[in-house]
């Protein structure tokens, strides 16, 4: 990323495969960020007044335009992020489904509904609805520059908020494309603003008085964002990194499991928060599973041409992380069955399948973000789950199993799990997504993702006054003893076992 000092500070985004300049963008500082937040703040009431129906129509128009311009968007993602066209297309396809779901379901999830009262408050009715927060700041990563930011943006918009997006400094052109197409589809509602720049621009957004910050990024950035937001008590939702595990049980379909392990670990060059970064296989099927993984992983190749299975490493300094993880693993006795110590060939990394990796190796503990798949033998499914859970991250996971699949999925310490596939939950708009521990907190997608960008508004309404109410200084002396007796009758009995 080259930074130019001119009257306006700018920076270039470049193709990780060729170094070609994709575009030049302003390095927005606190003033520009404040101006974008002010524009969003001004526009938000009009957007809220459109109501669920008006916003549904606007968001569906946005969806239709994105779909019509998919080829352009896919080509831009390929140039700026480096991933193959096929992977960029999958990313767009997935977010289109989310956009459609958020637009069509916001009213059902967030709209006013009556809720039950209690016996002692039987003369009151009650209702709850979810109101927009105002302006939401969204800070995005580069690895899924369409899917991850829009996974917050479209749910926040559907809930009636305005949004200011700060895309990654590695993929600003994609971020601007997303906001420009929104403006084109939904003219007159400037509720999707964009600011460009690096971490300092993101920091300025945290301090700009937005009503919530949604970050998708690394745990280190999550900590900084949370600390900055603490200043103004700005709430945060943090979608952070992962070290996802796959568990393969004895009755799994091994062809499927091996195919998905290799794809889940190496698609997008492993630069996926939900990538399969560890595989635990029960002893009974370890050898045949490994044989299939090796056969499949040996056939895939990185590159930037149409035949490449995955692209370059987008963030140049990540190459050093991958190299360090590999060197550490080999120094601790790990063996590579595919690839080896020279797998890192900037800007590419060849596929690596590792065995005999000790649990405390870096590649088993920290996010590698490369096409590296450590496969570990476990005594049984319980042991595999214990090994999988012994990690501070807890984003997603995968289980390949027959009868025990549900039990294993429940036991994995992760926000989401796919059974007999990998990553599927992320593309299912009715499911919430988010992590535990170092993977962050809060949820995007699904009903929880809509509520994440809303505040619950509770209203109780007295339907008729009681002759002797509790909430009065003029309460007659017999009221509280009577209420107490009623409470004992209703709640005082222990449940029968
Ligand atoms: P990053 O943390 O370096 O940057 C993320 C964003 O935060 C960028 O836009 C960056 O400019 C901004 N930023 C950096 N410092 C900041 C600060 N002090 N204040 C405010 N903003 C700041 O992450 P990245 O390298 O862009 O993305 C990769 C990481 O994102 C990986 O850890 C990956 O697992 C994670 N990720 C998580 C999910 C998920 O859904 N949980 C999805 C995709 C990526």
Image (spheres, rainbow, N blue to C red):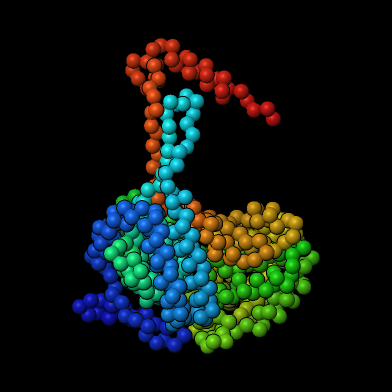
Left or right of 488? Residue 408 is: right
Q: In the rendering, at what x and y percent does residue 63 appear?
A: 43, 67
Q: In the rendering, at what x and y percent does residue 256 appear?
A: 70, 70
294 or 416: nearer the eye? 416
Q: Residue furthest left?
A: 7
Q: Residue furthest right?
A: 284
224 or 348: nearer the eye? 348
121 or 272: nearer the eye? 121
Left or right of 135? Residue 373 is: right
Q: Is residue 480 visible?
A: yes
Write the residue at 31% across / 53% down: 49
Q: In the rendering, at what x and y percent does residue 105 appear?
A: 47, 55
- Quadrant hosting residue 337: bottom right
Image quarter hosting the N terminus: bottom left
Write the residue at 54% across / 87% down: 306
- Quadrant hosting residue 229: bottom left
Write the residue at 28% across / 77% down: 10
- Quadrant hosting residue 270: bottom right
Left or right of 393? Residue 52 is: left
Q: Is residue 279 above or below residue 489?
A: below
Q: Is residue 218 visible?
A: no
Count of picture labels: 0
Image quarter hosting the C terminus: top right
Q: Is residue 331 above or below residue 479?
A: below
Q: Is residue 452 above or below residue 368?
A: above
190 or 314: nearer the eye? 190
Write the residue at 44% across / 11% down: 478
């Amino acid at each position: 990323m080259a930074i130019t000092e001119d009257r306006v500070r700018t920076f270039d985004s470049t193709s990780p495969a060729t170094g070609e300049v994709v575009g030049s963008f302003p390095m927005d500082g606190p003033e520009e960020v404040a101006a974008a937040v002010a524009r969003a703040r001004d526009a938000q009431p009009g957007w809220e007044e459109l109501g669920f129906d008006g916003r549904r129509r606007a968001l569906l128009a946005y969806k239709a335009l994105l779909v019509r311009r998919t080829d352009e968007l896919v080509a831009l993602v390929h140039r700026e992020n480096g991933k193959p066209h096929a992977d960029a297309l999958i990313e767009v396809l997935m977010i289109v489904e989310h956009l459609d779901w958020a637009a069509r379901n916001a009213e059902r999830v967030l709209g006013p509904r009556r809720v039950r009262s209690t016996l002692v408050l039987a003369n009151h009715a009650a209702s709850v609805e979810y109101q927009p927060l105002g302006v939401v700041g969204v800070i995005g990563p580069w690895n899924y520059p369409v899917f991850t930011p829009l996974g917050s943006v479209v749910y926040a918009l559907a809930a009636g908020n305005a949004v200011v997006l700060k895309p990654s400094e590695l993929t600003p052109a994609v971020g601007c494309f997303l906001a420009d197409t929104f403006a084109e589809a939904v003219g007159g509602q400037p509720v999707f603003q964009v600011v460009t720049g690096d971490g300092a621009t993101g920091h300025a957004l945290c301090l700009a008085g937005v009503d919530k910050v949604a970050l998708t990024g690394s745990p280190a950035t999550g900590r900084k964002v949370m600390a900055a937001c603490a200043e103004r008590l700005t709430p945060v939702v943090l979608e952070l990194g992962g070290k996802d595990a796959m568990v393969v049980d004895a009755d799994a379909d091994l062809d499927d499991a091996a195919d998905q392990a290799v794809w889940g670990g190496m698609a997008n060059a492993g630069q996926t928060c939900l990538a399969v970064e560890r595989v635990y296989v029960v002893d009974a099927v370890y050898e045949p599973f490994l044989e299939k993984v090796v056969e499949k992983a040996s056939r895939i190749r990185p590159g930037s041409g149409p035949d490449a299975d995955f692209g370059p490493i987008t963030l140049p300094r990540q190459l050093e992380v991958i190299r360090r993880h590999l060197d550490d693993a080999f120094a601790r006795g790990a063996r590579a069955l595919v690839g080896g110590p020279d797998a890192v060939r900037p800007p590419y990394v060849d596929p690596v399948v590792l065995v005999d990796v000790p649990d405390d190796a870096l590649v088993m503990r920290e996010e590698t973000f490369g096409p590296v798949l450590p496969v570990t033998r476990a005594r049984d499914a319980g042991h595999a789950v214990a090994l999988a859970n012994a990690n501070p991250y807890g984003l997603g996971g995968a289980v390949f199993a027959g009868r025990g699949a549900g039990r294993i999925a429940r036991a994995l310490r992760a926000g989401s799990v796919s059974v007999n596939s990998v990553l599927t939950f992320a593309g299912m708009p009715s499911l919430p997504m988010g992590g535990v521990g170092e993977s962050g907190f809060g949820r995007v997608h699904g009903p929880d993702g809509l509520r994440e960008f809303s505040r619950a508004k509770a209203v109780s309404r007295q339907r008729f006054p009681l002759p002797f109410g509790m909430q009065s200084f003029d309460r007659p002396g017999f009221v509280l003893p009577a209420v107490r007796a009623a409470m004992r009758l209703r709640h005082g009995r222990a449940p029968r076992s």
